[in-house]
Image: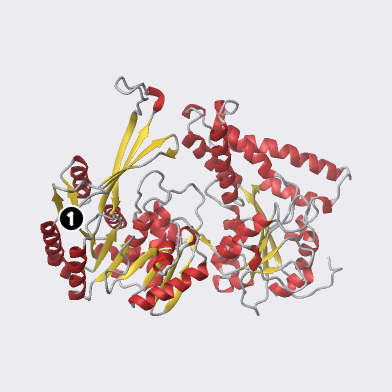
Amino acid sequence: MNAKTLDGLLDALPGLRIGVVGDFCLDAYWTLDMSLSERSIETGIPTRPVRRQQYSLGGAGNVVNNLVAMGVGSVAVFGVIGDDPFGWDMRRLLAKLRVGLDGLLTQGDGWDTPVYIKPIIGDREDHRLDFGNFNTLHADTTRVLLDALGRVLPDLDGLIINEQLVNGIHSTAFQDGLNALIGRYPKVTFVADCRCLAGVYRNCVYKLNACEAARLCGMICEPDALVPFDQTAEHLRDLYGRWGQPVFVTRGARGCVVQGSAGMEAVPGLHIVGRTDPVGAGDSMVAGLTAALAAGYPPVESACFGNFVAGVTVQKIFQTGTATPEEIRAIGASPDYLYQPELADDPRGARRVAGTDIEIVETFPAGTRILHAIFDHDGTLSTLREGWEQVMEPMMVKAILGPRYESADEGVYARVVGRVRDFIDKTTGIQTLEQMQGLADMVREFGFVSSAEVLDAAGYKRIYNDALLAIVRDRMARLERGERDVTDYTLKGAVALLRRLHAAGVSLYLASGTDQEDVEREARALGYADLFEGRLYGAVGDINREAKRIVLERIMQGIGPSNMACLVTFGDGPVEIRETRKRGGLAVGVASDELRRFGLNEAKRRRLIRAGAHVLVPDFAQLDALFLQIGIPAVSRRAP
């Protein structure tokens, strides 16, 4: 989905009328603070003081919340609550959204408002407390609910059917009545999101997750099990054949697969740098795709839109979040996708050029001559900064733990280290200042350091740079003294690659997240700065200006968007690979082992395939074969 299509869809939402019928729940977040715990006089058991309580709409309520937040003009609610404080709060929260509540019924006997109470201790969710598991829907409640729905359906563009409770509103009598209504109004778009009753409602679009689809097709599947893509595709075809309506199967971070009359299409997952919370993501997805379908968009574009909505909400921690049009537009205008996760995670599927270490991940259209080449610096050409992760990791851990660094128990320490490693893995390739902004956010989040002592991004960058530059300066001094030569600090074949490209008339660009002056100094020290003819770009101390994106924008302006097939980018980080992929250029991932300066780094291979690399190399030792693959004309190896 391009930006123009996304804007058109968002503009259409205020004119839509969508209903939601299902299991309306509350999500309750109770933040515990054990500092004021005391032993109960009655039981002798320590109390669990609640510092803060927060309630938000869950289940079908979260679907409604998402529809309203994204800008759907009219939303109608159909469900049942209990005559209890949680039910009163449910009605209050829904009333604030200004949705139609004529279909929200109260059953006082045999019905508790469904509530998921989630105690939060530190940054972890403790054992959940659930209300509403033993509800029984009365016959008169069923009748009144179906009558209310029948009165409104003729005026709706779409209806979302939510089912997630074993003892919710979906009794046998309710199923029969709803099926009759579905048959009576074929022009309404019906979308069913059912945990246990998939297939019960006829003539509906269905949204399921991969495990739900697997179970429907006879597989035993645990809720969080990874279902291979090929199996999901087989299940999708099976279910579409049974139901004859579009089927959407979500795969968590791996995106969504859609089967409709136009065939099966896959929508890749989104790359999200920060911490994520998947609670409510399925509700966001179904709200988004239903709105798009009701607006007349085809299934694959509807899946893309739902993916954008969910991509926003998973970034909202400890809440069932929503996505505004502005947030959806921000994530969808230039999305970062995750490509081919199965291949990335399983090297047994690698397809290599015969007799070489060059892996062809995805075929790139042949026939266009490469005229421009962008290079990342550290880890792609230079290894002067090899080991930066080993500098950044302990520096970040110490910054987060602050005064608790020496005294933190093993569990706390391991949790911080895990977060830091995941963050470094996801942010490799972006400029250092942006990584340090992420560090400042994590320091605040963990709360071991007082707010007054938390540094800004520039302050943390100074600490990191001082440690790293001490290593770099020592290596450059050894180079200047003749104790080392260029081959000791460059990837195998890197300088030869630059010289051959330059001799072939290819314009070279160097893009780095390292500071501008350091990039220039290090390129001169390694003897290839002149080959770039002044086109060396580093970070300029502005977190809002990404060096690599600036380079790509300048190249695009120079050669024109229609000629981006003339561009190749070489990089060992995901940022340059993603940005090139978005613009239609050829992305060569360099999965380098920076310590040895040759050979494959499996962690980088995984990262680069997910970022969208077309071709993967471990180094530049096999230049002739590489040039054949990317369309570079052969030139004399003696060319300057």
Query: Residue 5, can we see it?
Result: no
Which residue is pictured at 12% across the width and 62% down the height?
Answer: 143
**Relative to residue 290, is residue 284 depicted above or below?**
above
Query: What amino acid is found at the position of numbered circle 1 in the picture?
Result: Leu
**Relative to residue 508, is residue 425 depicted above or below?**
above
Q: Is residue 546 left or right of residue 110?
A: right
Q: Closer to the camera, 51 or 348?
A: 348
Q: Closer to the camera, 249 or 392?
A: 249
The scheme the figure's colours follow is secondary structure
**Relative to residue 489, is residue 206 depicted above or below?**
below
Q: Position of residue 530 (x, y in %)?
A: 77, 57
SS for dot 1: loop
Query: Residue 625, can we see it?
Result: yes
**Among the 4 quarters of the image, the one containing residue 344:** bottom right
Q: Is residue 532 left or right of residue 98?
A: right
**Among the 4 quarters of the image, the one containing residue 541:** top right
Please rate how many residues cluster around mark 1, counting C-alpha atoms within 10 Å: few if below 14, some from 14 to 19, many from 20. some
Which residue is pictured at 21% across the width and 64% down the height?
Answer: 172
Query: Which residue is identified by label 1?
Result: 137
Please identify the residue farthest to the top as the structure is shown. 41
Q: Position of residue 305 (x, y in %)?
A: 39, 64
Q: Position of residue 515 (x, y in %)?
A: 65, 46
**Among the 4 quarters of the image, the one containing residue 129:** top left
Which residue is pictured at 70% across the width and 56% down the height?
Answer: 601
Q: The C terminus is located in which quarter? A: bottom right
